[in-house]
Image (spheres, rainbow, N blue to C red):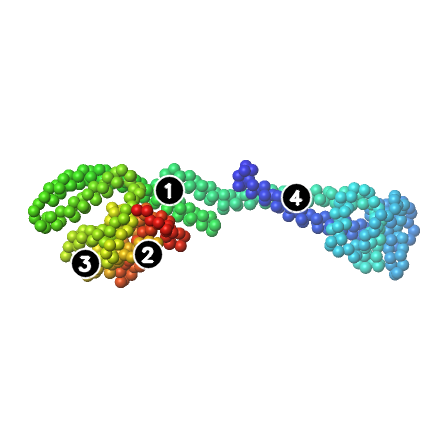
Amino acid sequence: MFNSLSGRLVILTTIFVMLAEVLIFVPSIARFREDYLMNRLERAQIASLALLADDMIDRELEAELLENAGVFNVVLRRDQVRQLMLASQLPQPISQTFDMREDGAAVLIRDALTRFVSPENEVIRVIGAPVRDAGLLIEITMETTPLRDAMIDYGIRILILSAVISIFTAFLLFIAMRALLLKPIKGVVGHMQNYAEAPEDARRIITPSASVTELREAEEALQKLETDLTQALRQKDRLAQLGSAVSKISHDLRNILTSAQLFTDRIEMSEDPTVKRMAPKLVSSITRAVHLCESTLAFGKAEEPSPTLTMLPLADLVEEVIDSERLAVGDADVSFACAVPFGMMVRADPEQLYRVLANLIRNARQALVSTGTAGEISVDAREDDEAWWVDVTDTGPGLPAKAQEHLFTPFQGGARKGGSGLGLAISAELIRGHGGTLELARTGQDGTCFTICLPKGDGTMTSNGKVAARSEVVV
């Protein structure tokens, strides 16, 4: 129980209420002492009235009056005359004098605490103002033991009452907190345990229902977390299934393409000029597809193989990609332009860079064809001391805002209806494998531009996005 939130709540509530009662007890005991002394003064004044009514009273009656008043002597000052009204023998000398007419709250509290912790019996003098102005002052002498005993008895009763109030308050607070807070918290914990058993089941996601603002905020945050996790697990499952399917398809496709490769070897022997001109491109495309299938099977579903870097002529590679895309244009009014400087050599993996450029140009071509208007796709390149820069630009309608938010995220960054968004994600991963970057330079109504950065040197990218090149390039 003591390790539970409810048990600790009860204990802390009891302690704090007791502490509050202790803070109340100190002035209360001081007030009790003051009332006790004033009561003794009133009794002594009443006893002295009997003597004023009859100047001649016997010793026995005088002793009885003093005993009933609980004092040893009574002195009354009337008409500037100080008179000893009642008197008896003191058991010991007077130790202290207290004037109840002048003491403030701090002095009363101090004197009360001092008397409360002092067990010695003393005789004290108490001075006060008579009731109903029956004189200038009244003065008595009394023992302190009855006063201290009465203070202790009062204190015990106060502490018992405080304990009862504390326990009762703690119990009521526990019932209230259990209904308003602890029970909803246990409900949230139960939802979490239920969700943990089958996080893929969207029916187990918590529905916020708490009336307490802070707890409802926690439930809403938990709901968002569970929703995101469920979607992530579903996507992971779909990706695993897709990976398995890709492996199977790649295996069968490789066999089909291998057979097609054998036929292209025979086509190359044809004497038809058109066939001779188209055959090398067909052979190159089929060979590239076979290599892609083999890489998928050999390296796995989720990773791309490390690039095999070599120096290659960029313009030739770009022209090869553009020639392939021209065949897919059909009747659409889409033109291509290669503005790569003649003889520019870049360090890259030919197959992977071809895939990146093909993805970017294909996306641009599909965007232009979908608009039904004329457009142009251009590829230009430049270099500096640190890197090679390749820009793929189109005059299309630009990327939608939703596509820009998750541009390089698989299955979320598709720029066209029905697109999976895998092309840009794969392209970005391939360029990262080169130590470079693929970024969206700009997009808008006047077109879109993607920029590829291929670093020279060791390809280390600094924090500001620049390339830290070594003085020598090893090819």
Q: Is residue 92 left or right of residue 375?
A: right
Label 2 or label 4, whichever comes before in sequence order:
4
In the picture of the structure, the residue carrying the numbered disc 2 is: 384
- Disc 2 versus disc 4: distance between alpha carbons? 88 Å
| Residue 19: image tag | none
Q: Amino acid at mark 3?
A: Val
Please name the residue shown 21% across and 60% down the image. 375
In the picture of the structure, the residue carrying the numbered disc 3 is: 334
How many marks on residues?
4
Q: Is residue 24 left or right of residue 361?
A: right
| Residue 161: image tag | 4
Check whether the beta carbons of the residues at disc 2 and disc 4 lie within 8 A of each other. no
- Disc 1 versus disc 4: distance between alpha carbons? 50 Å
Nearest to the eye among marks 2 and 1: give it. Answer: 2
Q: Amino acid at mark 4?
A: Leu
Quarter of the image for residue 396 reads bottom left
Label 4 or label 3, whichever comes before in sequence order:
4
Check whether the beta carbons of the residues at disc 4 and disc 3 lie within 8 A of each other. no
Q: Amino acid at mark 2?
A: Asp
Residue 79 percent location from the top left of the image: 88, 61
Disc 3 secondary structure class: strand
Please name the residue shown 64% across and 46% down the image. 19
Check whether the beta carbons of the residues at disc 1 and disc 4 lie within 8 A of each other. no
In the picture of the structure, the residue carrying the numbered disc 1 is: 204
- Disc 2 versus disc 1: distance between alpha carbons? 56 Å
